[in-house]
């Protein structure tokens, strides 16, 4: 049987999500216009000034949608917290993402491509806040599939049980934990991951997972900021996955208080 490699070696780009965000904004503006234009004559029968009043309200809503989209694009492009970045993360995570996923399905885009772009967009919004967090308030969260399936020493619950054989990514991650004095946990699923977050109460989470789990985790954790790093899956999903440790190192360098 031939194994088809499934990897995330190509860095996810936020360009796709930004493009879909622009399309969604146009759809929203068009829907607002139609909501005003279709019942326009009926409104005039109620009161001659009512169409104008409703028209002003619709213009304000359209302007807010366009302004919000523009601010998001500028924030991610410049990497700076221009205005209300935390609130914009809420809009992206809770409202825009479901709509954009629907638009993507309609035009035939791969769901994981959209999720990859969303994760990149989210990471950009988090790092644009220029947060500086103490090492003891950062949690690095890993999936259990990052350890080799045939390893007899299970590191779930305590990554420092690793004997440093170097056959999987765990060795490099233990080294990262010691280098920066950050807490690293391995979770067997979403329920355990949420339990770990509740117990440890981090100020920022750096999570490694696949597109689906990262997207779900980012949504579930809001307003807690999450930086997502995609794993690589040379043997398919949820089995002997790999992570580029240098990406974790780079992300920690950006957010650690020194």
Image (cartoon, rainbow, N blue to C red):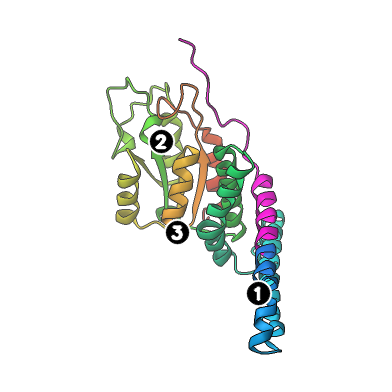
Whether the residues at callouts 1 and 3 have beta carbons within 8 Å, the answer is no
Q: Which residue is mark 1?
A: 39
User: The residue tagged with tag 1: helix, strand or loop?
Assistant: loop
Q: Looking at the rendering, in which quadrant would you find the N terminus?
A: top left
Q: Residue 60: where, in percent of width, then height?
A: 68, 76
The quarter of the displayed image where residue 130 is located = bottom right
User: The residue tagged with tag 3: helix, strand or loop?
Assistant: loop
Q: Is residue 7 left or right of residue 143?
A: right
Q: Which residue is mark 2?
A: 174
Q: Residue 118: where, in percent of width, then height?
A: 58, 48
User: The residue tagged with tag 2: helix, strand or loop?
Assistant: helix
231, 179: nearer the viewer: 231
Whole-angstrom CA distance, mark 1 to mark 3, is 42 Å
Segment colored magenta: 1-28
Q: Is residue 244 left or right of residue 187?
A: right
- Which of label 2 and label 3 is nearer to you? 3
Whichever of labels 1 and 3 marks the residue nearer the N terminus, that label is 1
- Mark sitting on residue 224: 3
Q: Residues within 10 Å of mark 3 (few under 14, many from 20)?
A: some
Whichever of labels 2 and 3 marks the residue nearer the N terminus, that label is 2
Whole-angstrom CA distance, mark 2 to mark 3, is 24 Å
The quarter of the displayed image where residue 201 is located = bottom left
Q: Is residue 122 left or right of residue 222?
A: right
Q: Is residue 21 above or below residue 212?
A: below
- Which of label 1 and label 3 is nearer to you? 1
Q: Residues within 10 Å of mark 2 (few under 14, many from 20)?
A: some
């Amino acid at each position: 049987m031939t194994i088809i490699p499934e990897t995330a070696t190509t860095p996810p780009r936020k360009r796709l999500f930004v493009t879909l965000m622009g399309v969604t904004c146009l759809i929203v503006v068009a829907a607002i216009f139609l909501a005003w234009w279709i019942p326009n004559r009926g409104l005039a029968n109620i009161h001659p000034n009512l169409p104008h009043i409703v028209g002003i309200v619709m213009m304000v809503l359209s302007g807010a949608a366009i302004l919000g989209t523009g601010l998001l694009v500028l924030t991610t492009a410049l990497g700076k917290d221009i205005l209300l970045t935390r609130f914009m993360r809420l809009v992206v995570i809770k409202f825009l993402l479901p709509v954009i996923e629907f638009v993507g399905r309609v035009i035939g885009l791969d769901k994981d491509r959209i999720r990859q772009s969303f994760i990149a967009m989210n990471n950009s919004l988090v790092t644009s806040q220029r947060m500086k967090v103490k090492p003891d308030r950062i949690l690095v969260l890993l999936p259990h599939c990052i350890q080799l399936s045939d390893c007899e020493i299970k590191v779930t619950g305590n990554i420092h049980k690793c004997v440093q054989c170097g056959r999987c990514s765990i060795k490099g991650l233990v080294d990262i934990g010691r280098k920066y004095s950050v807490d690293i946990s391995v979770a067997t699923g979403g329920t355990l991951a949420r339990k770990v977050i509740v117990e440890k109460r981090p100020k920022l989470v750096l999570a490694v997972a696949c597109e689906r789990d990262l997207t779900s985790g980012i949504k579930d954790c809001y307003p807690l900021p999450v930086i997502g790093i995609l794993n690589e899956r040379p043997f398919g999903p949820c089995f002997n996955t790999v992570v580029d440790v240098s990406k974790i190192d780079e992300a920690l360098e950006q957010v650690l208080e020194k």
